[in-house]
Every structure is written in structure tokens, then in C-alpha cells.
Image (tube, rainbow, N blue to C red):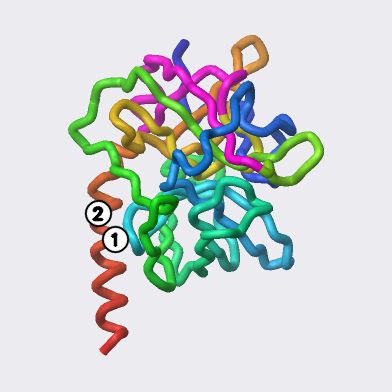
């Protein structure tokens, strides 16, 4: 199977506004409570006043990573969540600045990656920790991966509990050339899971949950994940420049 991310017939985003199937993590399971302390529940406030959500993950005490198509007028991140109805120990922090990739394409969803700078520092606890990122030298296709999130259920706009599921990546030349990882649909993320991490070998974040795509009618749908090793230079420079700008404003 050879899939070119820029030639897909149907691209279905996995935010709550997306038209994909109404299920939480598809064929998944409840995560062990607080076993994924890097997970971020990202509330997005639209111009219309509508509230939606995406996933995200904590890189350090100042920055969260998510998908560029999870853009909104303003944001609030919630850290330390397992059950959304239990706020004990949660940290709610507004986002000071959003940095979507400057080459993000809203048509084909290439470069679907975004950094969020928090308005105040996250406090690391047993339930709030950062995750390491795969390095630019991590070029071998990872073998053991999973995704997690609070995607929509059949009866709720948000899953009450953090769900997770194992995914198997496919070795696809065109996905690789377009800085994507891909997996066959049927087992993977659902609506509301965009922006969450693809976590692979050694508990590193290798990808960002992006979209579900259907190349054409006689091919199966696939999930796409933005390939973090291809964006390490952008990630590092964006965080460095944002931190310098913030330090300058403090004087």
C-alpha cells in the first residue's frame, strides 16, 4: 500500500468537530489510572464561544505539544487527569501562546504539529510528568506503539476515563516521505483524540495523532501521525525562541 498524504480523497480530522466514527479510542481499554502522567486534556475555546477538546502531551514545565488543526481562540490545559469528573490533584493552566507549524496545510494536513506555551509552569508530581521525544536519529520504524485519549463516546462528548490502545505502524514509503507514520484504521484514535502522543519503544513520543484518511473507496482507511523525529529542529528552535521572547518581556 502506498499512500501520499497530499493526494488523499478524504481527510477526517479527529477533533470533536470531525466527522469520524463516534467512539472513544477504537477497540481500546481503560488506561491504568495516572500511568500516563504526560497526557494533557486540552480545552479549546472557539470564536463562536463553542468549547471543544483535543489531546496533548507535556514536554517540560513550560510547553505542551498537540496537533496544528487543534487551533482555537484560546486554550486551557488540564494536567494530572484520569477521570474527567474527578478534579483532585488536577492542574488547570491557560495557554499564553500557540505556535502552529508555519507550513501547516489545512487542506492536506501536512505539518500538523503545534506547540503551546503555558502561562505558568506546570508542577511536576507523581501524576504530572513530561515525556521524552524521539530524536531525529530515531529513523527505524518503531514496533510497539500505543495512543491514548479522552475521545468522544456514543453517549458523551468526552470519555470520562483515559483510554488507550495498541497500534501497529505500517512500513509505507510515501507516509515516510511526508513525515508521517501510518497505521490501518479499526484500532486506534477516535474523535477528540487529535494531538495526543504516539508513544513507542522506550516510552518516547514518536508521533502526534493527526487524522484518519481514506485514499479511495477500495482502500482501507488509515490513521496518520506526524513524525516527531522529522520536526526536532523545529521543536527545539520554537521552544528556544519562545522562551527568549518571554524572558525579554519579563524585564
Report whether 168 appears left or right of 151. left
Q: Nearer the viewer, residue 248 or 172?
A: 248
Q: Is residue 102 visible?
A: no
Residue at left offset 35%, top offset 25%: 176
Residue at left offset 39%, top offset 17%: 172
Whole-angstrom CA distance, mark 1 to mark 2, is: 5 Å
Q: Is residue 62 visible?
A: yes
Q: Is residue 184 placed above or below 149 in the rendered structure?
A: above
Can you identify the residue that label 2 sits on?
236
Magenta region includes residue 110: no
Q: Is residue 51 placed above or below 54 in the rendered structure?
A: below
Q: Quadrant of residue 175?
A: top left
Q: Name the secondary structure under disc 2.
A: helix
Can you identify the residue that label 1 sits on?
239
Report whether 120 appears left or right of 188. left
Q: Residues within 10 Å of mark 1 (few under 14, many from 20)?
A: some
Q: Quadrant of the C terminus?
A: bottom left
The image position of residue 214, as x and y in percent, is: 61, 23
Q: Nearer the viewer, residue 217 or 205?
A: 205
The image position of residue 205, as x and y in percent, is: 35, 38
Magenta region includes residue 183: yes
Report whether 181 appears left or right of 186. left
Q: Nearer the viewer, residue 198 or 10?
A: 198
Which residue reaches farthest right? 155
Q: Name the secondary structure under disc 1.
A: helix
Q: Which residues are magenta?
A: 161-188
Residue at left offset 43%, top offset 46%: 37
Residue at left offset 66%, top offset 63%: 46
Q: Residues within 10 Å of mark 2 (few under 14, many from 20)?
A: few
Are the residues at dot 1 and dot 2 in contact (C-beta closer than 8 Å)?
yes
Report whether 117 appears left or right of 159. left
The image position of residue 174, as x and y in percent, is: 39, 22
Amino acid at each position: 500500500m502506498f499512500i501520499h498524504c497530499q493526494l488523499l480523497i478524504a481527510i477526517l480530522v479527529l477533533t470533536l468537530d470531525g466527522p469520524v466514527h463516534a467512539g472513544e479510542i477504537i477497540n481500546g481499554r481503560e488506561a491504568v489510572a495516572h500511568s500516563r502522567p504526560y497526557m494533557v486534556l486540552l480545552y479549546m475555546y472557539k470564536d463562536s464561544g463553542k468549547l471543544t477538546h483535543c489531546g496533548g502531551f507535556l514536554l517540560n514545565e513550560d510547553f505542551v505539544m498537540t496537533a496544528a488543526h487543534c487551533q482555537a481562540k484560546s486554550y486551557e490545559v488540564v494536567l494530572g487527569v484520569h477521570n474527567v469528573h474527578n478534579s483532585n490533584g488536577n492542574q488547570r493552566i491557560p495557554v499564553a501562546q500557540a505556535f502552529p507549524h508555519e507550513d501547516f496545510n489545512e487542506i492536506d494536513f501536512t505539518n500538523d504539529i503545534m506547540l503551546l506555551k503555558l502561562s505558568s509552569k506546570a508542577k511536576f508530581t507523581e501524576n504530572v510528568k513530561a515525556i521524552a521525544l524521539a530524536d531525529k536519529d530515531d529513523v527505524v520504524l518503531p514496533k510497539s506503539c500505543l495512543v491514548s485519549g479522552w475521545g468522544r463516546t456514543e453517549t458523551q462528548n468526552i470519555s470520562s476515563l483515559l483510554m488507550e490502545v495498541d497500534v501497529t505502524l505500517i512500513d509505507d514509503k510515501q507516509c515516510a516521505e511526508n513525515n508521517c507514520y501510518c497505521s490501518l484504521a479499526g484500532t486506534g484514535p477516535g474523535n477528540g483524540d487529535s494531538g495526543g502522543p504516539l508513544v513507542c519503544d522506550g516510552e518516547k513520543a514518536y508521533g502526534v495523532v493527526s487524522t484518519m484518511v481514506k485514499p479511495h473507496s477500495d482502500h482501507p482507511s488509515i490513521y496518520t501521525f506526524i513524525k516527531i523525529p522529522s520536526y526536532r529542529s523545529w521543536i527545539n528552535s520554537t521552544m528556544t525562541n519562545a522562551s527568549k521572547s518571554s524572558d525579554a518581556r519579563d524585564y
